[in-house]
Image (spheres, rainbow, N blue to C red):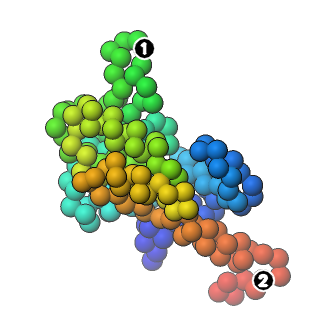
Amino acid sequence: MHSARQELLRLLAAKSFRLGEFKLSSGARSDYYVDCRTTTLDAKGARLTGQVFLDEIRARGWQPQAIGGLTMGADPIVVAVAVVGQMDGFLVRKAEKQHGTGQRIEGFRKQGARVVIVDDVCTTGASTIQAIEAAREFGFNVVGVMCLVERPEAGGRANVEKAAAPAPFVAIYTADDVRLEHLRQNDETSPGMPAVGG
């Protein structure tokens, strides 16, 4: 039986990883693109995402009261972990809304609460850092920061670790993990290749 972590990696490689020429939100060019939402918004992918994040949170003993992140990459992860882990969630707007209560944090709002910040992809770390800063400004105690896929070549880890300190930063996978699995899957399905297990 395969672990949830292995299953999620396979799904990310199949549904979310593309090779080609892409321009990233940072303006940089890349020979690959990872769109985690095609996995985190998939029924099976959402369940696996929730389980894998929850397993990591429990293994680290963070014991958060809520989970949250910057809309919209974090949205499906927040919901998945909240449902699987039976904990509260919150979303961080990119800017305070200009109507109603004008708040930037939506959902769980308890000052002093232990929270974990999540994100889908960490490239430069800018969106993760925005969420950390908004959470602390509100009064949350950030005990951990997690992303689903880290693009190590972009240097985001150092930026997030600096902003998150003293809270640790954890990446479930690196883009290299996903790339290798994507290439493995495509090798297995290439024409002329022998059937696996056949």
Decide if residue 28 is on the left or right side of residue 139: right
| Quadrant (top left, top right, bottom left, bottom right) of the C terminus | bottom right
User: Residue 24's spot in the image, x, y percent?
Assistant: 64, 47
Image position of 41 with respect to 56: above or below: above
Image position of 28 with respect to 111: above or below: below
SS of the residue under disc 2: loop
SS of the residue under disc 1: loop
User: Residue 21's spot in the image, x, y percent?
Assistant: 75, 55
**Residue at image coords 20%, 54%:** 63
Q: In this figure, which residue is indicated by the disc labeled 1?
A: 98
Specify the amino acid type for callout 2: Met
User: Residue 73's spot in the image, x, y percent?
Assistant: 50, 43
Q: In this figure, which residue is indicated by the disc labeled 2?
A: 193
Image position of 48 with respect to 135: above or below: below
Decide if residue 135 is on the left or right side of residue 94: left
**Residue at image coords 59%, 44%:** 26
| Disc 1 from disc 2: Cα separation | 58 Å
Image position of 105 with respect to 66: above or below: above
**Residue at image coords 41%, 52%:** 159
Q: Residues within 10 Å of mark 2 (few under 14, many from 20)?
A: few
Q: Which quadrant of the figure has residue 48?
A: bottom left
For the question of whether residue 195 can be seen, the reply is: yes
In the image, 56 versus 94, the foreground residue is 94
| Quadrant (top left, top right, bottom left, bottom right) of the N terminus | bottom left
Which mark is on residue 117?
A: none
For the question of whether residue 43 can be seen, the reply is: no
Specify the amino acid type for callout 1: Gln
